[in-house]
């Protein structure tokens, strides 16, 4: 039966066209954005996972930046210790040469004094981001545990931050306290009785020593004092070097983790462009056919007119 009031064919053709148009809009959106899931309504579960992972990746980006800065702090401290170690080694060599009878120890002391001033300057200059592990204001109030952000972690619904910690109690060289305890400015005592030496590395003075037996013993005790400090600086370098190596390793790990998260997010929400391209062409063809079907359905009523002619 053909009805003038109800065109079933046109209604079916229109519904089909509307559905194809909606699918075409969705496909066009995927092609233009590159995303298969862009909003929660596209897939609530996948969107939530991808959004959370993306947020965690942003946090890891901040961690990466913090590690880079922390690595720079470790690097500056290590470089400072290395240059100071070289200066202390030169002082040690000068003391060995000063043991030679008849040498002008005032001239040797002048060279030593220059190295000592240079060591203090280097310790004070080892600053980055307002942090200095080698020269501290006061050992009595200073926080000896220095931390660098190392990672952002999520376990279930709980998040936490891990750090790389460095105990600088055996690292700092200069102390601003009334009674300093840095490697370079702490008073050390070597020897006994009249030949004992009590001084800090920065206050070494051999200018008044003669070739007497006692003075030569004092010189040798001073040499031992410098050698002890040199050993402590090497130990400090080792501690900072371990922290530097950990920071570099963690930096590589965080970058790999961020790449893995990016791949996971892509697998969840990225559109398959080859598939979407094929689907787009198919929908465009279907749309054209639906428009033709609707046109044919709309002309069916005109054929009824021929019955009344």
Image (tube, rainbow, N blue to C red):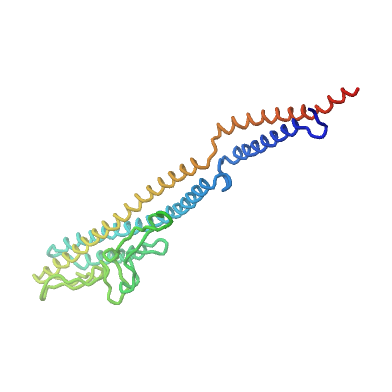
Q: Is residue 306 left or right of residue 82?
A: right
Q: Which residue is at the front of the view, 212 or 23?
A: 23
* Image quarter (top left, top right, bottom left or bottom right) of the N terminus: top right
| Residue most extreme to the right | 309
| Residue most extreme to the left | 213
| Residue most extreme to the bottom | 178
Q: Is residue 258 above or below residue 7?
A: below
Q: Which residue is at the front of the view, 55 or 67?
A: 55
Q: Is residue 155 above or below residue 216?
A: above
Q: Position of residue 133 (x, y in %)?
A: 33, 64
Q: Residue at x 58, y 34 (%)?
A: 276
Q: Is residue 99 left or right of residue 21?
A: left
Q: Which residue is at the front of the view, 156 or 87?
A: 156
Q: Quadrant of residue 38?
A: top right
Q: Which residue is at the front of the view, 207 or 244?
A: 244
Q: Residue at x 21, y 68 (%)?
A: 106
Q: Position of residue 126 (x, y in %)?
A: 36, 62
Q: Residue at x 49, y 44 (%)?
A: 265
Q: Is residue 277 left or right of residue 258?
A: right
Q: Quadrant of residue 284?
A: top right
* Image quarter (top left, top right, bottom left or bottom right) of the C terminus: top right
Q: Position of residue 166 (x, y in %)?
A: 31, 61
């Amino acid at each position: 039966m053909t009805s003038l009031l109800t065109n079933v064919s046109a209604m079916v053709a229109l519904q089909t066209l509307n559905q194809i148009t909606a699918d075409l809009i969705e496909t066009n959106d995927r092609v233009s954005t590159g995303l298969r899931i862009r909003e929660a309504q596209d897939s609530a579960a996948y969107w939530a996972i991808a959004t959370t992972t993306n947020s965690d990746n942003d946090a890891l980006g901040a961690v990466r930046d913090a590690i880079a800065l922390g690595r720079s702090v470790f690097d500056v401290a290590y470089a400072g210790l290395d240059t100071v170690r070289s200066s202390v080694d030169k002082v040690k060599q000068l003391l060995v040469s000063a043991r030679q009878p008849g040498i002008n120890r005032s001239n040797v002391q002048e060279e030593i004094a220059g190295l000592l001033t240079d060591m203090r300057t280097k310790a004070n200059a080892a600053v980055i981001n307002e942090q200095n592990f080698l020269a501290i204001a006061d050992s009595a109030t200073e926080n000896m545990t220095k931390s660098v952000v190392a990672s952002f972690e999520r376990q279930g619904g709980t998040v936490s931050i891990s750090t790389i910690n460095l105990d600088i109690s055996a690292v700092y060289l200069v102390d601003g306290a009334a009674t300093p305890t840095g490697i370079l400015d702490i008073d050390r005592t070597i020897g006994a009785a009249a030949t004992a030496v009590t001084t800090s590395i920065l206050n070494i003075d051999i200018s008044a020593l003669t070739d007497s037996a006692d003075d030569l013993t004092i010189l040798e005790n001073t040499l031992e004092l410098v050698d002890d400090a040199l050993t402590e600086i090497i130990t400090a370098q080792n501690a900072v070097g371990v922290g530097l190596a950990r920071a570099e390793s963690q930096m590589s790990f965080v970058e790999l983790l961020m790449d893995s998260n990016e791949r996971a997010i892509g697998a969840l929400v990225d559109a398959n462009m080859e598939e979407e391209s094929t689907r787009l062409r198919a929908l465009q063809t279907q749309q054209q056919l639906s428009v033709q079907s609707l046109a044919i359905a709309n002309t069916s009523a005109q054929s009824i007119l021929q019955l009344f002619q």
